[in-house]
Amino acid sequence: MLVIAKMVKVSLDLEESLHKAIRKRAIDKGITMKAYIVELIEKGKSIEESEVMEGTKEE
């Protein structure tokens, strides 16, 4: 059985320099900005979860 995750639209206001950097990196990787931003968020979430499990996250 195929389960499709429910998606939620998010709008972000970014500084132009950050937008350009993200756009360039996405182009270099051959993926969309959306895909790259999701990748960054998932990576950050994974790092944060690892820190919490190791007890190294400072709050």
Image (cartoon, rainbow, N blue to C red):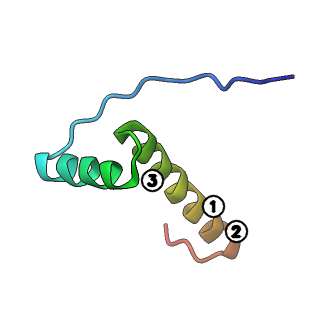
Structural distance between the alpha carbons of marks 2 and 1? 6 Å
Q: Residue furthest right?
A: 1
Marks 3 and 1, the one that precedes in the sequence: 3
The residue drawn where x is 26% and y is 47% is 23
34 in relation to 11, above or below:
below
Query: Residue 46 at what x, y percent from top left?
Result: 60, 59
32 in relation to 27, above or below:
above
In the picture, measured across the screen, residue 28 lies left or right of residue 54, that is: left
The residue drawn where x is 18% and y is 49% is 20
User: Based on the displayed image, in which of its 4 quarters is residue 1 positioned?
Assistant: top right
Identify the residue position indicated by label 3 in the image.
Answer: 40
In the picture, measured across the screen, residue 32 lies left or right of residue 5, that is: left
Which of the two marks, 2 or 3, is nearer to us in this view? Answer: 3
Identify the residue position indicated by label 2 in the image.
Answer: 53
5 in relation to 21, above or below:
above
Which of the two marks, 3 or 1, is nearer to us in this view? Answer: 3
Query: Residue 50 at what x, y percent from top left?
Result: 64, 67
Q: Amino acid at mark 2?
A: Met
Query: Residue 40 at what x, y percent from top left?
Result: 45, 53
| In-front residue for pair 17/24 | 24
Structural distance between the alpha carbons of marks 2 and 3? 20 Å
Instruction: Say if mark 3 contacts mark 1, CB within 8 Å.
Output: no
Query: Residue 36 at what x, y percent from top left?
Result: 42, 47
Instruction: Say if mark 2 contacts mark 1, CB within 8 Å.
Output: yes
Q: Amino acid at mark 1?
A: Glu
The circle drawn on residue 49 is 1
